[in-house]
């Protein structure tokens, strides 16, 4: 990260919140107090922006900046409202196609997934507001520019997104090795949302309980899992194959 990707200082961060600047995450020094600090905390929580409380040493790399113990990582893209995006996509002639990412943490995986999602005609990629790989120069490079032409939505709670999708008539399918049937046996020619889990833990059990179906890929060799970006590509293109 370079300092150009950040804004510094409590007042600047508060103003960024008030002007809807796309903030990915905010780092606040432990032990900060005062009315302005409390105002910033409140504004960030109201907008569902992730906060990380860090020791003073974390700000040493920003010693040339008047950071006041506060730094906000700015997103190079604007995020869409997931409710508005879902509603718009469901009004299209074609079947809607969504991708939900449950805490993908590697920036290269994130970028590669966005590239594939764009190529497969996914209408929107929906991610959690916190615990997600940030959008950096690495993720932009891995996406081959698809990041700037793909609709990305954020939500504080992925469960809320799933409830809204289901209430809107969208079938939500979880990609998990715990499934009993293969993705090739799942009918996908309808409004679909595919859920992909994190690299180390997969999809959270509480989310698995909510989905309409679970599906897996056949593993015929000695390796029992695939890189999440590779697995995601196979799932997305099975949707494409069935719709073609």
Image (cartoon, helix red, strand yellow):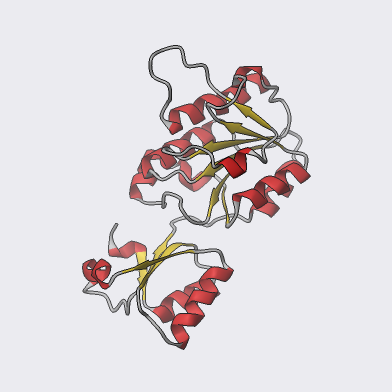
- Asked whether residue 143 appears in the rendered view, the answer is no
* Residue 108, horizontal then vertical, whole percent: 37, 40
- Residue 89 lies in what quarter of the image? top right
The front one of 162 and 89 is 162
Q: Residue at x 38, y 45 (%)?
A: 107
Q: Is residue 232 left or right of residue 172?
A: left
Of the 4 image quadrants, the one containing the C terminus is: top right
Q: Is residue 88 left or right of residue 230?
A: right
Q: Residue furthest top?
A: 220
- Residue 165 lies in what quarter of the image? top right
Q: Residue at x 32, y 80 (%)?
A: 68
Of the 4 image quadrants, the one containing the N terminus is: bottom left
Q: Residue at x 44, y 74 (%)?
A: 13
- Asked whether residue 167 appears in the rendered view, the answer is yes
* Residue 166, horizontal then vertical, whole percent: 74, 42
* Residue 233, horizontal then vertical, whole percent: 50, 28
Q: Residue furthest bottom?
A: 35
Tell me if residue 26 comes above or below residue 86 in the rendering: below
* Residue 161, horizontal then vertical, whole percent: 65, 49
Give the mark count. 0
The front one of 219 and 205 is 205
Q: Is residue 172 left or right of residue 199?
A: right
Q: Is residue 61 left or right of residue 92?
A: left
């Amino acid at each position: 990260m370079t300092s150009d990707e950040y804004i510094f200082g409590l007042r600047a961060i508060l103003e960024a919140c008030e002007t809807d600047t796309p903030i990915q995450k905010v780092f606040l020094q432990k032990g900060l107090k005062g009315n302005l600090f409390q105002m910033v905390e409140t504004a960030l929580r109201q907008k569902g922006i992730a906060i990380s409380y860090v020791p003073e040493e974390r700000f040493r790399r920003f010693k040339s900046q008047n950071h006041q113990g506060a730094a906000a990582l700015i997103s190079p893209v604007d995020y869409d409202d997931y409710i508005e995006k879902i509603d718009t996509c469901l009004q299209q002639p074609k079947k809607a196609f969504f991708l939900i990412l449950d805490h993908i943490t590697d920036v290269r995986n994130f970028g590669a997934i966005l590239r594939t999602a764009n190529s497969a005609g996914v209408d929107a990629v929906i991610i959690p507001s916190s615990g997600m790989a940030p959008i950096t120069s690495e993720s932009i490079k891995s996406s081959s520019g698809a990041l700037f032409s793909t609709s990305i939505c954020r939500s504080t709670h992925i469960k809320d997104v799933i409830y809204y999708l289901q209430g809107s008539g969208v079938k939500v399918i979880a990609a998990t090795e715990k499934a009993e049937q293969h993705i090739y046996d799942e009918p996908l020619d309808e409004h679909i949302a595919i859920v992909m889990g994190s690299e180390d833990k997969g999809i959270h059990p509480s989310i698995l309980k909510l989905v309409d179906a679970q599906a897996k890929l056949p593993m015929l060799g000695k390796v029992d899992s695939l890189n999440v970006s590779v697995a995601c590509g196979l799932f997305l293109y099975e949707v494409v194959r069935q719709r073609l």
